[in-house]
């Protein structure tokens, strides 16, 4: 009987170790037979538990079960104990045994889990960070989980821009190699990051249509809808239900509900103060202060309109004052207007508010034009620099190539957000050629088919949005390879 027990335990461990590395770089999908291996794994686990229960007294059975817990239930053990403790290397090795949660990419999932544990350390260890980076560099190809791990490593050293870029790119990878747990945890980090910065419109954008979303992210999305006054915002009772659905150990305190104005009328966030017919400058300052505290599309439009009225009132006084001082008329007002335009544009950019949708002339239109010109020149220079490097044959490691792509994609997205479809059509051709060249090189000569596939999918999405049928057809053909 003992021999049979040892045989079954050995089988369970062998099933866990078999296929422990990532799929070969030559295939665009995860290793085959994943569900068969998971089924055999759990069958072996059940047999081990039953045999232990038959053979051992209760006390010895309890001790044996606890000792075998990391092998029999590797992910619950990792999630409940190793990650909260910040034990990076133990987390990495235990996660590699997780045949269910990381069945599509266990090596990448182990790296992501290790980076997750690193973020739980009070002061993230540089040694642990370097150790994980070495594991990622040893991978034959960069997978979505590896990219997510690089994002969390960037967050651990305070580079939040890079962390956002890497984690936001994960859904672009083929879902056949992207584990649902990876999508969910990446979204959790992005939602928490946006909420911490008060970027509530971005929270709504991130969670809209998400297929893998946790209870925590759903709660924060509900709060975001309340804050910006979204028409589909949950009422007090619905928000309370969302809060109670979050597991107790991960449940935020009630300050988050208070931030949403949980005692306000259902679905309605606090509106910015309305113009009271008093002094236009005082009204503009009040609306501007309200916008800084609770950024929203409506608040941005109201503040811009109030400043328009205030500047109209200031103009005669400034002209008279300029004549008294012998200065050129219009110069002070132009400077004030330019300062306000720049300030409104900065708020819109920081909060992810679309000036292209809000501007209908006046200050918002001028702010949009200012942002558009800046973005156009920046995107074109970045695309030209990438093309020159590729023409010279100066190739980078896969992780750095991903950084180049995502940095250019971020500039492109910011330009489109500030300038709308007009900017999209202008700059798409500028970014399409160098990124297509890079994607083809990664696919044909570097063995980075997963990364190339994600870049191709991004180019296809943007080609369709820009109305470039020829580019869309090209990327559709590339995606079928």
Image: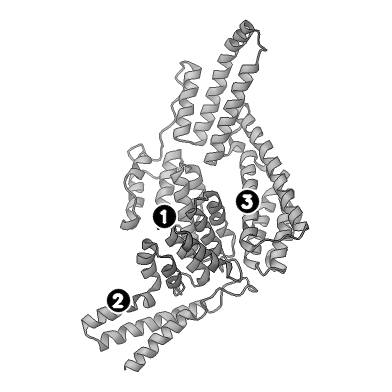
Q: Quadrant of the N terminus?
A: bottom left
- Of the two numbered discs 3 and 1 in the rendering, the one whose residue sits closer to the viewer: 1
Query: In percent of the image, x 36 and y 92: which residue is there?
Result: 4
- Name the residue beneath numbered marker 3: 407
Label 1 secondary element? loop
| Furthest residue in direction right, as rendered | 391
Note whether 224 is above or below 367 in the view shown: below
Q: Residue 233: tell me if it is visible.
A: no
State how far apart marks 3 and 1 are (Cα): 27 Å
455 relative position to 150: left or right: right
Which numbered marker is on residue 123?
1
Of residues 232 and 328, which is closer to you in this image? 328
Of residues 146 and 254, which is closer to you in this image? 146
User: Label 3: few (<14), some or many (≥20) within 10 Å?
Assistant: some
Label 3 secondary element? helix
- Name the residue beneath numbered marker 2: 66
Label 2 secondary element? helix
Q: Which is more N-terminal, label 1 or label 2?
A: 2
Query: In percent of the image, x 72 and y 49: which residue is there?
Result: 383
Query: In percent of the image, x 47 and y 73: which residue is there?
Result: 96
Note whether 432 is above or below 14 in the view shown: above
291 relative position to 250: left or right: right
Dividing the picture into quadrants, the one containing residue 436 is bottom right
């Amino acid at each position: 009987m003992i021999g049979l027990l040892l045989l079954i335990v050995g089988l369970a461990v062998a099933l866990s170790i078999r296929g422990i590395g990532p799929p070969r770089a030559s295939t665009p999908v995860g290793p085959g037979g994943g569900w068969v291996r998971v089924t055999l794994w759990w069958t072996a686990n059940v047999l081990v538990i039953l045999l232990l229960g038959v053979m051992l007294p209760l006390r010895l059975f309890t001790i044996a079960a606890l000792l075998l817990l990391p092998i029999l239930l590797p992910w619950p053990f990792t999630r409940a104990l190793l990650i909260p403790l910040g034990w990076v290397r133990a987390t990495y090795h235990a996660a590699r045994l997780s045949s269910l949660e990381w069945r599509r990419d266990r090596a990448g999932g182990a790296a992501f889990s290790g980076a997750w544990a690193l973020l739980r350390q009070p002061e993230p260890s540089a040694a642990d960070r370097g150790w994980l980076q070495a594991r990622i560099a040893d991978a034959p190809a960069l997978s979505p989980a590896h990219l997510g791990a690089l994002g969390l490593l960037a967050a651990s050293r305070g580079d939040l821009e890079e962390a956002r870029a890497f984690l936001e790119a994960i859904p672009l990878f083929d879902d056949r190699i992207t584990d649902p747990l990876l999508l969910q945890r990446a979204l959790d980090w992005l939602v928490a990051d946006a909420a911490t910065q008060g970027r509530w419109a971005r929270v709504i954008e991130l969670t809209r249509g998400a297929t893998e979303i946790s209870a925590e992210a759903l709660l924060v999305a509900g709060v975001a809808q309340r804050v910006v006054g979204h028409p589909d915002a949950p009422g007090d009772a619905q928000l309370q239900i969302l809060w109670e659905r979050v597991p107790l150990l991960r449940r935020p305190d009630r300050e988050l509900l208070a931030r949403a104005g949980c005692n306000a009328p259902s679905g309605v966030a606090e509106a910015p103060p309305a113009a009271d017919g008093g002094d236009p400058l005082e009204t503009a300052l009040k609306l501007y202060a309200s916008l800084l505290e609770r950024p929203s599309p409506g608040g941005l439009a109201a503040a811009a309109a109030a400043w328009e009225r205030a500047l109209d009132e200031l103009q005669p006084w400034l002209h008279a004052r300029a004549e008294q001082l012998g200065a050129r008329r219009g110069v002070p007002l132009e400077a004030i207007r330019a300062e306000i335009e720049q300030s409104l544009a900065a708020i819109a950019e920081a909060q992810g508010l679309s000036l292209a949708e809000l501007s209908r002339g006046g200050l918002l239109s001028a702010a949009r034009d200012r942002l558009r010109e800046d973005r156009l020149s920046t995107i074109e220079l970045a695309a030209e620099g990438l093309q020159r490097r590729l023409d010279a044959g100066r190739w980078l490691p896969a992780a750095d190539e991903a950084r180049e792509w995502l940095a250019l994609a971020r500039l492109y997205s910011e330009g489109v957000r500030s300038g709308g479809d007009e900017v999209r059509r202008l700059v798409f051709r500028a970014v399409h050629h160098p990124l297509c060249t890079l994607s083809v090189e990664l696919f044909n000569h570097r063995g980075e088919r997963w990364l190339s596939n994600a870049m191709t999918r991004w180019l296809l999405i943007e080609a369709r949005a820009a109305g470039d049928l020829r580019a869309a057809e090209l990327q559709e053909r590339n995606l079928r390879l």
